[in-house]
Image: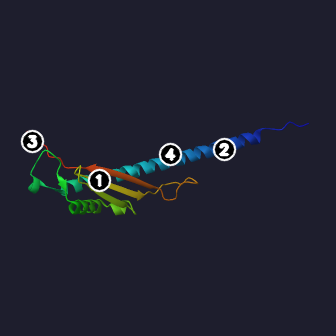
Amino acid sequence: MKERGEDGQVTLLIIGFAGILLMAIVAVIDASSAYLQRQGLDNLADGAALYGADLGSSGIYEEGLGDDRLSQQEAAVRAAVRDYLARAGAARNYPGIDVGVRIDAVSRSVTVRLEAPIDLPLTVPGSPSRPRVAASSTAAVTVVAGG
Protein backbone atom coordinates (compact mmCIF):
# COMPACT_ATOMS: atom_id res chain seq x y z
CA MET A 1 0.00 0.00 0.00
CA LYS A 2 1.35 3.39 -1.04
CA GLU A 3 1.61 6.22 1.49
CA ARG A 4 -0.19 9.39 0.54
CA GLY A 5 2.05 12.51 0.35
CA GLU A 6 1.26 15.82 1.97
CA ASP A 7 2.90 18.05 -0.63
CA GLY A 8 -0.37 19.30 -2.12
CA GLN A 9 -1.76 20.27 1.26
CA VAL A 10 1.22 22.53 2.03
CA THR A 11 0.75 24.33 -1.30
CA LEU A 12 -2.92 24.88 -0.51
CA LEU A 13 -2.00 26.22 2.93
CA ILE A 14 0.55 28.66 1.43
CA ILE A 15 -2.01 29.88 -1.13
CA GLY A 16 -4.58 30.38 1.65
CA PHE A 17 -2.15 32.37 3.81
CA ALA A 18 -1.11 34.46 0.79
CA GLY A 19 -4.78 35.27 0.13
CA ILE A 20 -5.32 36.30 3.75
CA LEU A 21 -2.15 38.42 3.67
CA LEU A 22 -3.28 40.09 0.44
CA MET A 23 -6.71 40.93 1.92
CA ALA A 24 -5.01 42.38 5.02
CA ILE A 25 -2.77 44.58 2.83
CA VAL A 26 -5.80 45.80 0.84
CA ALA A 27 -7.67 46.60 4.07
CA VAL A 28 -4.71 48.58 5.48
CA ILE A 29 -4.25 50.54 2.24
CA ASP A 30 -7.97 51.37 2.03
CA ALA A 31 -8.18 52.29 5.71
CA SER A 32 -5.17 54.59 5.37
CA SER A 33 -6.63 56.25 2.29
CA ALA A 34 -10.01 56.75 3.98
CA TYR A 35 -8.32 58.20 7.06
CA LEU A 36 -6.29 60.69 5.01
CA GLN A 37 -9.32 61.77 3.00
CA ARG A 38 -11.35 62.21 6.19
CA GLN A 39 -8.54 64.29 7.70
CA GLY A 40 -8.61 66.55 4.64
CA LEU A 41 -12.38 66.89 4.98
CA ASP A 42 -11.96 67.61 8.71
CA ASN A 43 -9.46 70.40 7.98
CA LEU A 44 -11.86 71.84 5.41
CA ALA A 45 -14.74 71.78 7.93
CA ASP A 46 -12.55 73.49 10.55
CA GLY A 47 -11.62 76.29 8.18
CA ALA A 48 -15.19 76.76 6.95
CA ALA A 49 -16.60 76.91 10.49
CA LEU A 50 -13.98 79.41 11.63
CA TYR A 51 -14.43 81.57 8.54
CA GLY A 52 -18.21 81.43 8.80
CA ALA A 53 -18.20 82.30 12.51
CA ASP A 54 -15.76 85.15 11.97
CA LEU A 55 -17.48 86.78 8.98
CA GLY A 56 -20.98 85.97 10.21
CA SER A 57 -20.51 87.63 13.58
CA SER A 58 -22.86 90.42 14.37
CA GLY A 59 -24.07 92.11 17.44
CA ILE A 60 -21.06 94.37 17.98
CA TYR A 61 -23.05 97.43 16.98
CA GLU A 62 -26.35 96.29 18.48
CA GLU A 63 -25.10 94.56 21.64
CA GLY A 64 -21.65 96.03 22.17
CA LEU A 65 -18.61 94.05 23.25
CA GLY A 66 -19.86 92.10 26.22
CA ASP A 67 -18.29 89.17 27.98
CA ASP A 68 -20.05 86.61 25.82
CA ARG A 69 -19.84 85.15 22.34
CA LEU A 70 -20.95 87.27 19.42
CA SER A 71 -24.25 86.38 17.78
CA GLN A 72 -24.29 85.06 14.22
CA GLN A 73 -26.22 86.28 11.18
CA GLU A 74 -27.40 83.17 9.35
CA ALA A 75 -27.22 84.60 5.82
CA ALA A 76 -23.72 86.00 6.39
CA VAL A 77 -22.51 82.71 7.89
CA ARG A 78 -23.86 80.64 4.99
CA ALA A 79 -22.35 83.03 2.42
CA ALA A 80 -18.97 82.95 4.18
CA VAL A 81 -18.97 79.13 4.35
CA ARG A 82 -19.87 78.87 0.64
CA ASP A 83 -17.13 81.37 -0.21
CA TYR A 84 -14.53 79.51 1.84
CA LEU A 85 -15.39 76.14 0.33
CA ALA A 86 -15.33 77.58 -3.20
CA ARG A 87 -11.93 79.20 -2.67
CA ALA A 88 -10.57 76.01 -1.09
CA GLY A 89 -11.70 73.94 -4.09
CA ALA A 90 -13.95 71.66 -2.05
CA ALA A 91 -16.11 70.60 -5.01
CA ARG A 92 -13.03 69.84 -7.08
CA ASN A 93 -11.25 67.85 -4.36
CA TYR A 94 -14.38 66.10 -3.07
CA PRO A 95 -16.84 65.58 -5.95
CA GLY A 96 -20.33 65.03 -4.59
CA ILE A 97 -19.68 66.88 -1.32
CA ASP A 98 -22.71 67.66 0.85
CA VAL A 99 -22.51 70.76 3.04
CA GLY A 100 -24.58 71.41 6.12
CA VAL A 101 -24.43 74.65 8.11
CA ARG A 102 -26.14 75.07 11.47
CA ILE A 103 -26.22 78.25 13.54
CA ASP A 104 -27.04 77.69 17.21
CA ALA A 105 -28.67 80.83 18.60
CA VAL A 106 -28.29 79.68 22.21
CA SER A 107 -24.57 78.91 22.16
CA ARG A 108 -23.95 81.48 19.38
CA SER A 109 -21.88 78.99 17.45
CA VAL A 110 -21.57 77.78 13.87
CA THR A 111 -21.36 74.10 12.99
CA VAL A 112 -20.29 72.98 9.52
CA ARG A 113 -20.81 69.35 8.53
CA LEU A 114 -19.24 68.01 5.35
CA GLU A 115 -19.91 64.60 3.85
CA ALA A 116 -18.39 63.23 0.66
CA PRO A 117 -17.88 59.95 -1.17
CA ILE A 118 -14.30 58.75 -1.13
CA ASP A 119 -12.25 56.95 -3.71
CA LEU A 120 -10.44 53.92 -2.34
CA PRO A 121 -7.40 52.69 -4.25
CA LEU A 122 -8.39 49.02 -3.88
CA THR A 123 -11.68 47.26 -3.30
CA VAL A 124 -12.42 44.38 -1.01
CA PRO A 125 -15.12 42.00 -2.23
CA GLY A 126 -18.31 42.71 -0.31
CA SER A 127 -17.30 46.26 0.68
CA PRO A 128 -19.40 49.31 -0.28
CA SER A 129 -18.74 50.51 -3.82
CA ARG A 130 -18.92 54.23 -2.88
CA PRO A 131 -18.18 54.67 0.84
CA ARG A 132 -18.70 58.12 2.36
CA VAL A 133 -16.86 59.98 5.08
CA ALA A 134 -18.06 62.92 7.13
CA ALA A 135 -16.47 65.60 9.25
CA SER A 136 -17.90 68.41 11.32
CA SER A 137 -16.53 71.38 13.17
CA THR A 138 -17.99 74.00 15.47
CA ALA A 139 -16.67 77.53 15.98
CA ALA A 140 -17.72 80.67 17.81
CA VAL A 141 -16.33 84.18 18.20
CA THR A 142 -15.67 85.06 21.81
CA VAL A 143 -14.74 88.50 23.07
CA VAL A 144 -11.63 88.41 25.23
CA ALA A 145 -10.73 91.39 27.35
CA GLY A 146 -7.27 92.70 26.48
CA GLY A 147 -4.83 93.42 29.18
The mark nearer the N terminus, 1 or 3, is 1
Q: Is residue 28 left or right of residue 96?
A: right
- Residue at the image point whose x is 55% and y is 44% from the top: 24
In the image, which disc is placed on residue 94?
Answer: none
The mark nearer the N terminus, 2 or 4, is 2
- Residue at the image point whose x is 59% and y is 43% from the top: 21
User: Which residue is identified by label 1?
Assistant: 111
- Quadrant of the drawing holding the N terminus: top right
Q: In front here: 89 or 18?
A: 89
The mark nearer the N terminus, 3 or 4, is 4
Q: Residue 2 location, x and y as percent? A: 89, 37
In the image, which disc is placed on residue 146?
Answer: 3
The mark nearer the N terminus, 3 or 2, is 2
- Residue at the image point whose x is 48% and y is 59% from the top: 130
Q: Secondary structure at mark 2?
A: helix
Q: In front here: 13 or 57?
A: 57
User: Which residue is identified by label 4?
Assistant: 28
> Real-space Cα distance between discs 3 and 2?
67 Å
> Real-space Cα distance between discs 1 and 3?
27 Å
Color scheme of the displayed model: rainbow
Three-letter code, disc 2: Gly
Q: Secondary structure at mark 1?
A: strand
Front: mark 3 or 4: 3
User: Which residue is identified by label 2?
Assistant: 16
Q: Secondary structure at mark 4?
A: helix
Q: Residue 60 location, x and y as percent? A: 11, 54
Work out which residue is located at the far front of the displayed protein and give it. Answer: 106
Q: Residues within 10 Å of mark 1 (few under 14, many from 20)?
A: many
Three-letter code, disc 1: Thr
Three-letter code, disc 3: Gly
Q: Is residue 96 left or right of residue 138?
A: right
